[in-house]
Amino acid sequence: MFAKPTVLSLCLALLVSLLYAPAAINAADEPPGQDPAAPQNLRIVDLSHNMATFEWDFIGNDQDPQHPNDIDIWDADTNSYLTWGNRWTHALGGLTPETTYRIYITWYERPATLAHKSNVLEFTTTADMSEYKEAPLTPPQNFKVSDITETGITFGWTTSPQATGYDLYMDGDWKAGVWNGTDNAMTYTIPEEKRVAGAALNFYLGAQDPANARVSANSNEIDLIWGELAAPSDLQVITANRDTVNLGWAPVPGATLYTVYQGGTVIGTTSEPRLTASGLAEGQSYDFTVRAANQLWESPISETLSAVPGAEYTNVTYYTAWSLSEQGRNFKPEDVDYDNFTHINYAFADLCWKKFGSGATACQNGNIPLQSDYVHDGEVILGDADFDPRNFASFKTIKEENPHLKLLVSVGGWSWSNNFSPVAATELTRRTFANSAVNFIREYGLDGLDIDWEYPVEGGEEDNAHSPEDNVNFTLLMKTIREAFDAAGSEDGRYYLLTIASGQGDNFVVNADLANSSAYLDYINIMTYDYSGNWELFAHHNAPLYHDGSHPMDYAARNNVSGGAVGHLNGGVPAEKLVLGIPFYGKGWAGCSDGGQYGTCTTIPSGTWEAGVFDVADLENNYAGKNGYEKHWNAASKTAYLWNEENGTFITYNDDTSMKYNASLVKSLNLAGVMSWEVSGDRNRTLQNQLAHDLPLDGTANAEALPAPAGLAIAGKSSSHAQLKWNSVNEADGYEIFVNRKYIDATEGTSFNLEGLSASTSYSVYVLAVSKDGESIGEVSPASVITVTTDAPVSYVPPAPPVKDKNELDGSVSKQNGKLTISVQEYLALNTIKGNKSAAFKITADAAADSVEVLLPKAVAEAIADKGEDAGLTIIWGGVAYAIPASALQHGADIRITLAPPAGDAAGSIEEDAKAAGITLLAEPIDFIIAAKKDDGQYEEITDFGGSLLKRSFTLDGADADGHRLIGVLYLPESGQFRPVATTATENEDGTITVELTRDGNSIYTVAVTGFEFEDVAMDWARDAIELATASLLIAGKSETRFGAADAITRAEFVSMITRALGILPSQGEIVFGDVDPDSAFAGDIAAAAAAGLIAGKSDGVFDPNGNITRQDMAVVLGRALSFAGLEGSADAARLDRFGDRDAIAGYARDAAAWLAQLGILRGVSGTAFSPTTNVTRAQATVAVIRMLESL
């Protein structure tokens, strides 16, 4: 997080180490005659392994201190600011043992200045000779009921590091135990007298380490009333966007399953106290309730929660501890307008490591309840022992007055992330951190925790610890905290929030393993700012929203707010969990020329509190339009800036108009909301008022909001340009066009020509509507998005008619109304067949015909069959060839073969259905039907070909075709669906491509190509599989540009993908499960899968199509699919031994999981974790299905 004053980087304190030993101390030789205006005679007073106490010639004295002697402390080698001090606080802490430092001090001034420096003080810290206590045995974590019967309860928990046994207590008395060191579950038979309705039971668990005579504190407690479950409480909207609501509630002791209702209708079940309700309509109010259950009991329904997608945005702001300082910001908690915010992140708490926080403050403090005794490595501690208790007391009253407000404590930050890496490195320190976090939020009445680790693996301050394993440990830390919070919530009747502050770079996405760690997080605050700063003299914007093509640096295309957000989405962060960062400050440079923007300047000017950094309120009050500072607007980056021609100062910042465009981006990307750093910088409330207006947070939709332009379409295009059109928006005064997140231009019309495009290239085009208030922007709409591809669709080029040869069957030809009828002449055909060594025969039809009908006598069909198993007949019509095995023609009757374009409703709907499916048809669709003549002279369509496979070949111009994305499809007009057909594509020497489709039935066939414009599938492990699966029509994206890789796949979506992969057609009109809407897109697939024995449902008549599928349930379905496809095998249970959570895999899924692990289809979420109950994402499911197909 930006701009934590480096009062937090290396704290000053009065503490003097008891372990001081003499070391190399040198008040470095300075030129004679110190600056008389600077502090005089800086010198060491005391020195230890991690702290230096010093003094100077104080002004005044202790009895009559006329001067507080406020100072700033600087690194003498880099001139970088370290921290502040005064007469009473003059120690530099957080130092590294046996390391040399050089510092000087200046008098405290704001803005800070280096005009008058003290002498330089050089010193070397001592060796660390301290003694550190071993952390106690941690209690079992996440103790909960996993099963219950009429006679007993099965408990589960997360084991404790170093524990070898566990003791179960009921009502305070020891009842049972397990001691093999690895068990994480036990079943206890409840005494009969306790198994009566209304009987109260209390359970908790303890861990033991007999070898070292250690026992742990107790786990979380489980309070039960036999025969009852409490209704879920604290039901809340965690986050919401335009079509999704993330729900959370307090875990119910004894519950193993939760059913979530939307307006009385079940929308999902989950074993976790949270669920995502998706597919909602923006602006519509929905009522949600939750019911808890276990194997015996069911709770009453929860209280009703109403939520309005598009009007429940998250709006987080940071409040800093030091804002309370009357000598500094002097901005109190009471000064915040809480109507504008949903969450306050209090900055910052610190981490204890080796008895100290990140600075000079000792962890143990008798005046702080949680720190009065020895504080172990990894425990959360107060960041400021003076300000924090006072601020928390104020916030307690504020929360009572603002019941909607959530208060979280942020741990770490830029200056206090030194020790996150070692804390996350072991299960012991992770548990210590998580347990202390629970104690911390309970002690100070908080709603959750925000992790601000800056940064895992790389980056941050130079003295931060890093490890290559930080990315793995980051996820483990989040999982550990989540478990601890859920366990605490079950005791407290609360849902505790877990969030993080995220770096804006793609490296953070990888280094924090966001693709996996986000599953444990309620939302992610991405710090999309600090793209420029006082570390460089190149003047550019702090938080450019979009790419400005005038920016001269190559990195500008990615280094902008939209680039950061899209990078996170591509990296697996669900859109409804991503919160966009907003800076309430600007950046400045001096000594600039030519307007300053994108130029190299000479110096960094003094800022509001530190060099080059300006609060927005300061700029509004003291700069804009005053003393030569003229305000300008960068329409491309959507940022404001000030330029002073007289002194050459350039200052960039985000104003209220910037907020309108930020809100538009949140809506366009369908994000959860915004986060701001930090609230004291917007004292005039300019930015926060605008954000609260544009992103409603109280459930009341903004009636003035402009809608996105509807009807965005391509009116025409060539290899170098595209013409766009859209419908006009009421109240809009104009429209803005962006290509690949770069601003292009604005227009007052409803069309626009994009020029200078590259051939054979796809572009993502955004169009926004804006209204004007005079010359100012009034409202900004969300974007409408379309993908423009400059290369034309692959054209179908009919090949020249084949030369008639000796295996061509003769027939009489007639033509009526474009229909060509070929009646095979029995006598001539039999002579050709009998006199020919070949078993393959053909009939060639005129390519100019509109449709073709071939009449084949029974005797001719039998004669072809007599030529052997490989015999067959091929019908060639233009660029299409239908190869029919002789076995498919043996029906004891004359045969009629028809090839024609689709007729009736299918003719008009196929193109529309293809567009809706996101595919392009490359050849004219052909309705192919084989019929047998009945005794009454009528023809009846053949539906059973006895397993015979027919081959259809289409010849296409391959100049622009991508053979990897071609797919043969059959069209189902009754449902408007396209289903994949087994397809092979062969490149011919003449540049054409022959695409061969193989299937055993009649239908409408063609060849299609799918686009792949998804922006959220950058991950290497899944991209190829997703590309193959979408090309094969096994699964579709959520939109043209979004696959939904990180979204949990529904049970219906997964079953549909399986049936498509196996070539099973949907069963229309069959109702197998009562909760499956027969008109839904997946109803036919679900019915077909049930008929094939692939699925059985959750219970009798219940399938839960919109629920999520767990990894173990996916394993069961995949195993059945393999068996259906003819692959048989036995499960090697040892294949699961490498997974530490193998015992958590349900019995019904264990064989399937072992078999799939043996085949390499399911490989675990890591080398040691299978994670059987984790919901499967769309990306994970796609990879698994492709691996299944590859194993067949």
Image (cartoon, helix red, strand yellow):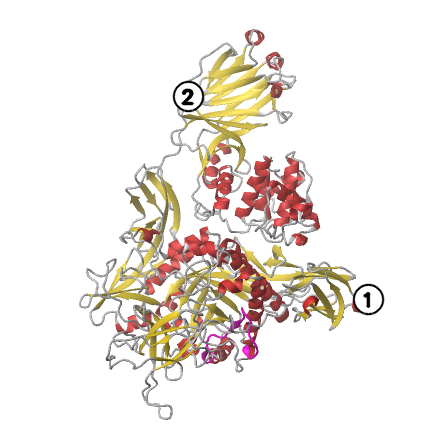
Picture quadrant of residue 61: bottom left
Query: Is residue 1064 positioned above or below 626 on the image?
Result: above
Q: Position of residue 595 (x, y in %)?
A: 21, 61
Q: Secondary structure at mark 2?
A: loop
In the image, 96 versus 80, the foreground residue is 96
Among all residues in the image, which is located at the extreme bottom? Answer: 63
CB atoms of marks 2 and 1 within 8 Å = no
Determine whether, in the image, residue 399 is placed left or right of residue 740.
right
Residue indicated by mark 1: 192
Q: Main secondary structure of the magenta part?
A: loop
In the image, 341 versus 446, the foreground residue is 446
Determine whether, in the image, residue 978 is placed left or right of residue 221.
left
Q: Secondary structure at mark 1?
A: helix
Task: Tell me where the magenta segment starts and ends, as one range.
Answer: 371-387
Query: Is residue 958 positioned above or below 648 on the image?
Result: above
**Quadrant that contains the C terminus:** top right
